[in-house]
Image (tube, helix red, strand yellow):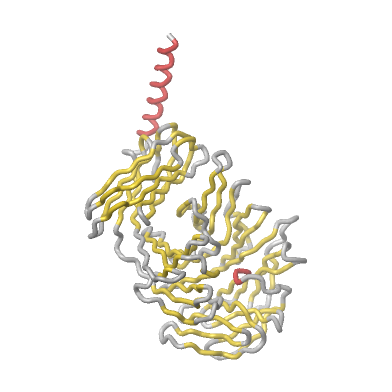
Amino acid sequence: MEQIRTKIKIMSLLICTLFLLSMFPGATTATKTIHNETGAVPSHMVLKNEPPLIKITDEDAVCDLGDEYAVYADVSTLYLYDLKTGETENILVGGNIIYPKISEDKVVYYDFVYMGFKMYDITTGEKTDLIITNWTGGDADDFQFFGDRIVYQNYATDIYSTEIYLYNITSGDNIQLTDTPGEDFSENPCIFQNIAAWQLTKGAQADIIMYDIASSTYTNVTHTSPFESDTYPSIYEKNIVYSYFYYDKPNGTTLYGLKMYNITTEAETTLFTDGEPTGGTPEMFANIIVYSLAGAGLCLYNFSTNYTITLYEGDYLTQPWNVNENYVLFTILGDGAYLYRYNNPPPSLEITIKGGMGVSATIKNVGTTNLTSVDWAITLDGRLIFAGKTKSGAIGTLAAGEEATIQDSVIGFGRTGITVSAGASRANTSGAVLLFFVIGVK
């Protein structure tokens, strides 16, 4: 009798699960197309060099990138590198200057002699004294400049009591945006058009806070748990991208990655998660994000097409890096600053992720070259995944035009992000786990 009851319970559970699966057409499928390619240069670093990299200086300069110029400084001299002509103009501005930031035809920098911000007009050659602060020149990410506004980090009493301020160059208004309680502190501000954002650090965790300048309203972009942290925001138009960290205490594993918040829809998207730490300061222009893997290198990622490429491999990368419509600008310690002109070539791998009984993915070689020994991995980041969080293997041979299917059995419950990698390629989606089944794959 007990065996009959057990069978009835199992059948009831399966019927319920199949009913829920029927609510999602087919075994719902997500298709992501990605490509990764790395050049090889024999030295302490590996740089992507097709098309050729452009070295703008041999100095280990902290650079910024505008539409027409790359800018950096050395003591009392400001350097403007013309992206069209490849020529550098040396401008003696005096003082002891660091961290120049460019927006349109204006450059803002910090002067230790003046103990405040100054501005240089590229068109007129005019130099303007701006606001004096008690900031003592910590990091390049401690302030940003856009249009006629500077958002900056200032010390209230010491380096552990920082607040965020907004300075209007035209009006001279200086507004304190934060009043951080207790031992918490605000840092890493960024700005684009009418939106400012920063990182609110609370002990070992951090959240991203957004401020709408026109309406003077604040938004908690993220609401981290004791095991999560979101850091280093960057804004472009209606999107904020930031680094993500999650510690899965029950399983003793950690996940790193990038997330993106849409200011209009208030939707948060996980761009990818991985076991390798992402470095700080992801930078964004349109649909291009440039980010680092700690101690590993610099990557360019197109979140519209999922195209990704490694620009540099090694642990000599210095922060920050920058990106505009055509170029990525970055500095290698002991080697100088480089420009990389990027493009998005056709993809060579197509990854289709499916739900159903576990997670499966189709890896198709849409390129013209036969591939061998293609390593693959499936990763789920849900908190209630009891089995099947990760699985890996290798595809022996994948000829041009052919495809292979990989699969991971899962036991768990609740929403989860799903990452599938094949070789150097990656695809991301999300779904829900219901015991043995993965449903609602987007």
Quarter of the N terminus within the rendering: top left
Residue 256: % across, % down:
52, 53
Q: Which residue lies furthest to the front in this view?
A: 43
Q: Can residue 54 be seen in this view?
A: yes
- The residue closer to the viewer here, 154 or 406, is 406
In the shown orientation, is residue 138 left or right of residue 353?
A: right
Q: Can residue 193 be seen in this view?
A: no
Q: Residue furthest right?
A: 157
Residue 262: % across, % down:
49, 57
Question: At 50% across and 56% down in the image, what residue appears?
Answer: 258
In the shown orientation, is residue 352 left or right of residue 189?
A: left
Q: Quadrant of residue 37?
A: bottom left
Q: Quadrant of residue 77?
A: bottom right
Residue 57: % across, % down:
49, 82
Residue 42: % across, % down:
40, 71
Question: At 55% across and 48% down in the image, what residue appears?
Answer: 246
Count of residue discs = 0
In the shown orientation, is residue 410 left or right of residue 369?
A: right
Image vertical order of residue 165 relative to residue 114, above or below: above
Image vertical order of residue 93 relative to residue 210, above or below: below
Question: At 52% across and 69% down in the image, what residue appears?
Answer: 316
Image vertical order of residue 134 relative to residue 381, above or below: below
